[in-house]
Amino acid sequence: MASAGSLFAGASSDGEKAVEYIVSVYPERSAAIYHKGEPVNFEIYLEHNRQPATEGAVVWKLSKDGVFPPLQTGTATLNAEGRAVVTGTLGEPGFLQCEVTFKGSDKNYTALAAAGIDPSDIQPSLPKPADFDAFWAEKKKQLAAVPINPKLTSVPPPAGRAGVETFEFQADCIGNPASGYYARPVGAKPKSCPALLYVEGAGVVPTDLLAPTRYAQKGVLALDLNAHGIPVGKPREYYNDLANGELKDYRVRGRESRDTYYFLGMYLRALRGLDFLTSQPEWDGRTLIVVGVSQGGAQSLAATSLDPRVTFTVACVPGQCDPSGPVVGRIAGWPKVVPKGPDGKLDPTVLEAMRYFDTVNFATRIKTPVYGWVGFCDVTCPPTGSYAAFNQLAGPKSIINDPVRGHDAGGPGVWGAISKAVDAHIAGQGKAAQ
């Protein structure tokens, strides 16, 4: 099923800072879903000192996905209540974005919103490679030949987090080791705990000890896995140096071949993290969850696709979706790894390699429940790519649509909603076992 997010108006203010003007825009329909060729009304509202602006005009722009040449532009005059309406259409499945700007005396005030146009009809831009399954089966075979050799080093839990044990984690893998922070309830009995793997978003940042600790306090075995297999618990400068040096532009490293692309190691480390969790005597043997946002969303879908033990997946604004989107006139998802040549066409060698890391193709193999979040104004991991992937899922899915959110997937309400979804799955698994 799909549902709308809790906010429907993209506004130029966060509601906390005092500003002279606030401009907002929202699709007329609360669900923000329309059909091809159907008129989409965007309602605009301007406030001046917290009251409806009694005069003025706004500049508006309608575009596909927020990046393609504007379909229409114009100026709308506000009525006495500070309101105006802009109408547009899109003749294909996708997302129609409305950008509104009010030019104040001191600065410009801008707001965004978008509507989904038959998003459930968005299909992959290219078919899954014929040997996709065979390629990953061979990589899994190679990984299985490497003993896990897990190493746990006790570390103090975050302040005020009683009842848990926390550890630095490391395990052997192909290439870099799997690394992260692991947390478990103190005194957990054998076969008593669900297990959860959290996979990180983009960048080179310190791994979070608090995230697995929170889940461990709920009786869950939880591992926060570092995306790069690097040591955890180092000073911030350590990670900054890696981000500016050895791991700079890791997103495109080895992209010329499916056997050398950087994300191959990242996906295998996610599988190794699942191997570790399911080898723990406290694991209940039935509940295995993967949670990821952005780059983490790509890892969570890949890991679920490749490990049939996973029972529930969170993939919010997932990365690596539909890198071949430009082939059919769509925006490519992060990491936007396929370059264009002088002729404007996608590099064929890189394009072919990236098909093996496209979450759209991993999604075709997933039959267990998936919880997703889509920002309609996201140009980093665009909603067209997310829906190209989500539409391939064969199992139950709950997709939260937010017409005004971009790539700020950690914004208000998101993590609380994720936690509730995870808790509900764990509770359902417990009832099923009774």
Image (tube, rainbow, N blue to C red):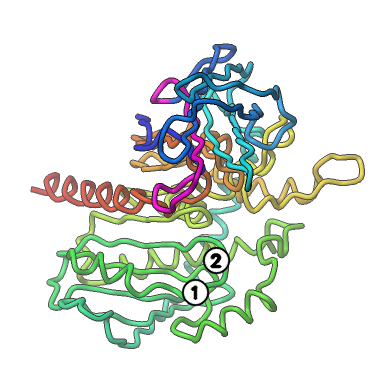
Q: Please, is residue 178 above or below residue 314 in the view?
A: below
Residue 364 visible, this orientation: no
Q: Could you give the CA–CA distance between mark 2 and mark 1, rounded to whole angstroms?
A: 7 Å
Coordinates of residue 354 in the picture (x, y in percent): 68, 49
Q: Please, is residue 421 above or below residue 296 in the view?
A: above
Q: Residue at x 53, y 19 (%)?
A: 85
Q: Quadrant of the N terminus?
A: top left
Residues in magenta, as a range? 13-31
Q: Is residue 25 magenta?
A: yes
Looking at the rendered structure, the secondary structure element under dot 1 is loop
Residue pointed to by mark 1: 146
> Which class describes the residues within 10 Å of circle 1: few (<14), some (14-19), or many (20+)?
few
Q: Residue at x 53, y 54 (%)?
A: 137
Coordinates of residue 217 in the picture (x, y in percent): 19, 68
Looking at the rendered structure, the secondary structure element under dot 2 is helix
Q: Please, is residue 166 above or below residue 274 in the view?
A: below
Q: Quadrant of residue 181?
A: bottom left
Judge left or right: residue 254 versus residue 196.
Answer: right
Q: Residue furthest left?
A: 434
Judge left or right: residue 409 versus residue 96.
Answer: left
> Do tag 2 and tag 1 residues touch (Cβ < 8 Å)?
yes
Q: Residue at x 36, y 62 (%)?
A: 197
Residue 142, numbered label = 2
* Amino acid on which disc 2 is placed: Gln
Q: Residue at x 55, y 12 (%)?
A: 39
* Amino acid on which disc 1 is placed: Val
> Which class describes the residues within 10 Å of circle 2: few (<14), some (14-19), or many (20+)?
few
Q: Is residue 96 magenta?
A: no
Residue 360 visible, this orientation: yes
